[in-house]
Image (tube, rainbow, N blue to C red):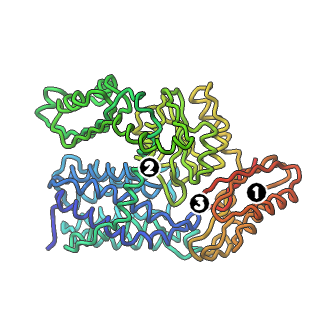
Amino acid sequence: MGLKRLDGLVFANMVANGAANLSQNADYVDSLNVFPVPDGDTGTNMNLTMTSGAKEVAALNTANIADVSSKFARGLLMGARGNSGVILSQLFRGFGKAIEGKTEVSTVDFAEALKRGVDTAYKAVMKPVEGTILTVAREAADEALRASESTSDFNEFMERVIVEAKASLERTPDLLPVLKEVGVVDSGGQGLLVIYEGFLASLEGKELEKPHAPVMDALIEAEHHAHAAQGFMSTEDIEFGYCTEIMVRFQDAKLKDAPFNEDAFRNELSELGDSLLVVADEELLKVHVHVETPGDVITKGQRYGELVAVKIENMRQQHSTILEEEHGANQHGVQPTTPKAKAPYAIVTVAMGEGVSDLFRSLGAAHVIEGGQTMNPSTEDIVKAIEAANADHVFIFPNNSNIIMAAEQAASVAPCGVSVIPTKTVPQGLAAAIAFNPEADVETNESVMKTAASTVKSGQVTYAVRDTSIDGVEIRKDDHMAIAEKKIVASSASSLEAAKKLVDALVDADDEIITILTGEGSSAEDVEALSAYIESKNDEIEIEVHDGKQPLYSYIFSVE
């Protein structure tokens, strides 16, 4: 007979095995990613998200499954990348909420927790699409509830969950036509199945290899990029010099003398410094704040329980080091950036390519997060960019449909007012940035920027990562795909010919301006030929060309 009660130690090993199995299969999951285009990043996003959660769990050594699941859920949330990563984080956030207060669980408890996770994930998605990871999670959870009624053996229980998850995955092409057209199952659902298979392998005593070093390096690199924004601050202008983070485990004895009130505690800490982030549940309290007196933060936190972790960094010292490293560049004529006082508004945007980033900065963006298709920033990356923007209210332009959910998650935990303008393309983001009015209020700016983004026609030329056929268009690996809005309209071995087909699909006689961002795979000769072709279609249209230097995309079009 297998295990009948699951504690935190066993669950922690299940998490490690689930992460390891996903790491080993991430490329395969990527290869299934054809919705909405064959760009191949679902496995990468889920892998980075899962690894972040597993990394948090690995630091624990407790038999309390509530503590482990809480830590796991928080790690997933802060490392979530792309829609698939955010949905995965919500599945286990709801799971953790369902087993709060439990030191160990039965199959009944586990099944109810899976169902709670599904409910949480569906609520997080504005327009749930069936035939995706949501469907696989829901149908697997329904089977878990049925299985828990007839077995208390976790091995048998997980076997039944996996059988149903596989069956659900096989049904996804019947629910999502593009999957049937291409002949694949949903990539997100496949990723979730791989995680569940890792869970079962752990229960069976099979320890899988830990995530490969490149995965960990990617996480470290992402964190490095997020912190790099601090280098633009001037050392002498840092008002609060110590980045202070504490984690407190609540203790009943202390709470009797000092009941915890999250809003009151947040207001209390706000008097000590800035960049404040307070996250609390029934078990744990986490604080991030910039202060002059870190000891005061520790003392205030200890009123409610025992310290689990403390991290204090001298930001003035860090910035002095950064300025010293940049000194050589300044000697060659590069001037230090003038420090900015806290502003009422700031724009944070996501972009790939030095030229595209420079365009956003020229339009007033305070911070540009490096990322986009196949390289989605995490929730934590966006939160740190919001903090670095140093404003009372921040507007976020995700510029990719796969980043919108992560931006919304970041907004929910940010230490200031945040509005997510749901831009799905770089042209939409640029249009929104142009429409921004620093003299208008938040609501007016939200309305105007959303309207501006919606009036832009967007297109791009990128390359395919696999042979496929979508909407009647035959695509071969490394072909250049012309994508008008969300629809693939043509595929060609030539990026110029694909761009011309895109012009045919996007430009009409009433259009006045077309902006072209050139990137990887374009050339000056091709741009000249493309401009001549556009003029032959509409000799009244104004053509603007910018060197976006973006990877993956030869051309990005904005038509107004």
Question: Which of the two labelled residues, at mark 3 and mark 1, occupies the earlier sequence position?
Answer: 1
Q: Residue at x 25, y 64 (%)?
A: 14
- Label 2 secondary element: helix
Residue highlighted by disc 3: 551
Residue highlighted by disc 2: 225
Type of amino acid under label 3: Pro
Whole-percent x and y of residue 279?
A: 31, 38
Type of amino acid under label 2: His
Question: Which of the two labelled residues, at mark 3 and mark 2, occupies the earlier sequence position?
Answer: 2
Type of amino acid under label 1: Leu
Whole-percent x and y of residue 548?
A: 64, 53
The residue at the far front in this view is: 331
Residue highlighted by disc 1: 506
Q: Kindly indicate the quadrant of the structure image that contains residue 193.
A: bottom left
Verify CB contact (< 8 Å) between mark 3 and mark 1.
no
Query: In this orientation, does residue 123 appear?
Result: no
Left of 176 or right of it: where is 476?
right
Look at the picture and state if 417 lies above or below 173.
Answer: above
Look at the picture and state if 4 lies above or below 305.
Answer: below
Q: Foreground: 149 or 174?
A: 174
